[in-house]
Image (cartoon, rainbow, N blue to C red):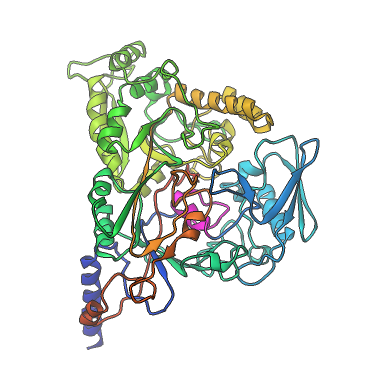
Amino acid sequence: MKHRLLTKIGAAVAAVATMFAVAPGAAIAADSDSGSTLRVAGGTNYDTFNPFNATMASTTDVLTLVYDSLVENAAKDNSDAPGLAKSWKVSDDKLTWTYTMQSGAEWSDGEPITADDALWTYESIMKNPDLQTAFGSNVESIASVKAPDKNTFEITMKEPQAQNPGNVWILPKHVWEKQNAAKYANDKDVVGSGPFTLKSYDKNSGVELVKNQKFWRGADKVGFDRILFIPYKNTDASVQALKNGEIDYVSGLTAAQFNSLKNDPNITTYAANNRRYYSMAINPGAKDINGKDMGDGNAVLHDKKVRQAIVMAIDNKTLIEKAFGGYGQEATGEVPAVYPLYHWDASESDLTLAYNPDKAKQLLDEAGLKMGSDGYRTDKEGKPLELRLLVGAEYPNWVQMATYIKPWLKEVGLNVKVITESYSQVSDASSVAKYDMYFTGWGIGADPDWQMSINRCSSRPNADGSGQLSESNWCDPEFDKLYDQQHVEMDQTKRSEILKKMQQMIYDAAVNDVITYQQALVAYRKDKVTGWVAQPTDGGIYTQQNGYWGYMGAKPVASASGSSASASGVSPAVWAGIGIVIVVVIVGGVFFAKKKHANADDEE
């Protein structure tokens, strides 16, 4: 009898989950508490909530709400702004940075935030290679750190550094020193300093964030009591849920979805200038950190002419128009136009790999790839040539791009096999260089130093994909020299020019065809949420920021009765009719940068 009852309840739960088109393991229910809840449509891709090793944008978007750095990026323009340090100064020789901590700041468990926490965090990253995935490049130039007292933290550099070194998430020493820091999951009852804390996470049910009542900027400045990232099978389902009032915010919309919501009286649509780019990576012949071959990329791609021909055979303007609905800017280098200080605003003459199929054919001929009678080229040994293009199935823009790229490459004689699978599979394959080409995306921080650092020879991973983070498994000693120069250049004009030259080198190497700085297409229920803060404030993004300003500023809209808007968006009568209560479970995750490669942001 008990078994039958449980079976019936399980069937009812499954039916409700199907009715609302949520992902397996997730369900939606009316709130049992009186607090306000912001429901965000999310995905299911997270790498780790361990801040030392998190690189996927979905994960860092969550952790950004939980932890502060000594120095934050201002909402207005991404410039340096006070974080856990209320002020800082640099010595005359540019080697010593001194930070004065915020007075009276507390962790979410009530323990004081002091310079000792900063000291423990920085020393942990500096001394332990297993803790360097996310912030390793941030500490490379640091000679030593010390905390003369509870309110003062000092960083002494090996050499002058252009980027403020106070940009590492500070962790609570009293929590982390008791753990194996490299393996600590950090996925429930998390102690943090940001506006929210991570209450719980389960891979089948997801993430719940709750307001940090000890938030040092003031809990009253945080609009919602809770944030849930609710997983949906696809964005079509999340759009329908938004229309039905079941969720409050959706990002990562396609142009068609975005346009379909424009005339809904309860929904606001917003196309934001994004800090992300989308690209197609091309395997240049990956090697591990010891210089040994890794992966199974096709050997013809070792030839730069072949990679350049592939880039020249692809019409990025058409991809932006057809796959992105025109919501995007044609890209040049890896730093988006939202960061004008470092963006490579290339002239037409600089873009030597612009769409030119005739030139692409010429390069392939020069590379010795002869055309066969079937219209496809052979490799240099005369064997049939097939290149694999990996596509994350969760991203319809990418699936659509593949339908254009395959015939374009056929036009120049290249046979492409499109392999569409889950992005987690694509990410795993890319981590060990088992690809020829694949679509990816990166979120760029306010300072491009980190993004450039993952293109160095020293950033190549271990043979199993662990260790350092490499963007494209590419290595050029000349690029490394430029990186070292910009890293210490204190003259902003000179540094900007070096960084633009570095982007041009990546472009010329044709290891990462940056296609577009797509606009971030979002929509939200205007009857449930208001107060979003953009970064930068002039047309910037609401979420996936270099900070927590968007989520912190969002607040519930008062209902007609004066109480906050319904958090569930589902009529109580409906739940009464169903006759069961389904516990809310959530899985966060928005757009990723890449498991092996992000943040990108994202770092992500």
Foreground residue, 376 or 49?
Answer: 49
Residue 506 seen in the current view? yes
Foreground residue, 24 or 400?
Answer: 400
Give the answer, above or below, for where 489 lies relative to 312.
Answer: below
40 part of magenta stretch: no
Q: Main secondary structure of the magenta part?
A: loop
Q: In this view, does 532 lie to the left or right of 154?
A: left
Figure quadrant of residue 285: top left
Question: Which percent across, then down, holds residue 565?
Answer: 36, 71
Give the residue drawn at x 27%, y 38%: 325
Q: Residue furthest bottom?
A: 1
Figure quadrant of residue 418: top left
Question: Which percent across, then down, holds residue 377?
Answer: 26, 19
Give the answer, above or below, for where 43 lies relative to 142.
Answer: below
Image: magenta residue range: 48-65
Give the residue drawn at x 34%, y 62%: 248
Foreground residue, 562 or 399?
Answer: 562
Give the residue drawn at x 51%, y 36%: 339
Question: Which percent across, then down, holds residue 205?
Answer: 37, 66
Give the answer, above or below, for where 476 lies relative to 418.
Answer: above
Q: In this view, does 341 lie to the left or right of 70?
A: left
62 part of magenta stretch: yes
Give the answer, above or below, for where 200 lies relative to 253.
Answer: below
